[in-house]
Image (tube, rainbow, N blue to C red):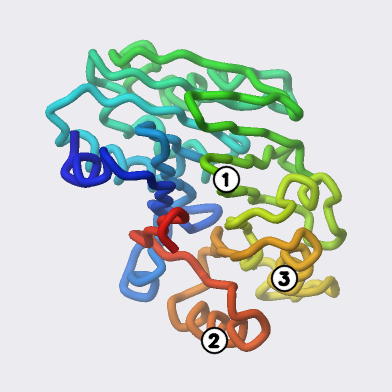
Amino acid sequence: MSGKERTLEHQPYLLIKFWGVRGSVPTPGAATAFYGGNTSCIEILADQQRFIFDGGTGLRVLGESLYQSSHPVEGHLFFTHTQWDRIQGFPFFLPAFESGNQFHIYGGIAANGASIKQCLSTQMLKPGFALPLHTMRAGLTFHDITPGDTIQIGNVKIEPIGLRSASNALGYRLSYQGKSVVYATDTDHEHIDENLVFLADQADLLIYDGVYIDMCDQINPPASPQPWKAAIQLARTAQVKRLGMVHYGPRQTDAVLNTLAHELKQLEPQVFLAHEGMVINLLQN
C-alpha cells in the first residue's frame, strides 16, 4: 500500500488524479512540460478501490508508481474506446506483469466486432510488440459492456453511455457518497449530445475534451464553433458544478493552453485545463 493510500485509508475521499491529458500521440518536450505529453489516463480512488479510465501512455507512468507497492495491486480499468491514444500505455503497464495483482478490464465492442480483450491483445502481437498478452502474469478479467449497463463495485456505481462519436466511444459516470464524476472524451462538438447531457446532469465534475484541435484544423480552421465553446454550453445545459478539460492536440503547447485557460476563466470561473499530476478530492473541495 502506498503512503497516499495509507493516509486516505480511514477518511472518505473521491480522489481524481490526471496521469495523461494529451490526445492522438505522446508529445514530450520543454514546450509541453507543464500540461504534459502523455496520452489519456485518469485515476480515481474511492471506497478503498482504484478506478482507471483509459490506458494511454499516462498508464505507464501510473504503473511505475504502483510498481513500488509492497502489497498486491488491484484495480478496475475502463476504456472509452480503443484508438491508439487510449490503449498505447497498456503493454507498458508494469503491474499487469506481476503475479498476485488483479485487474478487471472493461470496454465496449469495437465497430469491427472486436471485444476489449481482442483489441488489447492485437496491439501486443508481433511485429508490433515483443510480449503478447498472455505474458501478463497478473489476474486479468475482461468485461464487455454496453451503454445503459450499471456496474456496482462496492459502494461505487459506474454507468457507461454511448457518445455521439466517430470512434464509437463510451462516456462514464462514477458516483460515490452523493458525488459524481463524468468522463467523456472524443465527442462531437457540433451538436449537443443529449445522451451526454443526461449522463452529466448536475455532476460535480465533468472531464471533457473541449480543447482538442488537430493538426489539420490548425492549418485549415473549421467553420464549426471552437470545441471549448461547445464544452461550456454543454456544461451549462447539464448544470455541472466544475468543468475540467483534457485531450490536448499535439501542437497545443503550454503557451497556447495558458492563453486559452486565461480566456476560459473570463467566460466561466469553474472551468479549468487539467495537467499531468493534478489531484482533486471532491469530498473536500
Task: Compare residues 179 and 275 and report the one nearer the observer.
Answer: 179
Name the residue nearer the viewer: 195 or 175.
175
| Left or right relative to 97: residue 3 | left
Q: Is residue 59 left or right of residue 235?
A: left
Residue 109 higher or lower than 220, as above or below: above
Q: Earlier in the sequence, mark 3 or mark 2?
A: 3
> Which secondary structure, mark 2?
helix
Q: Position of residue 163 (x, y in %)?
A: 76, 43
Q: Amino acid at mark 3?
A: Ile
Question: What distance separates the C-alpha of mark 3 from that of mark 2?
Answer: 14 Å
* Foreground tag (1 vs 3): 1
Quarter of the rendering containing residue 215: bottom right
Q: Which residue is mark 1?
A: 178
Badge 2 is on which residue? 262
Q: Residue at x 33, y 70 (%)?
A: 33
Give the residue type that dot 2 points to.
His
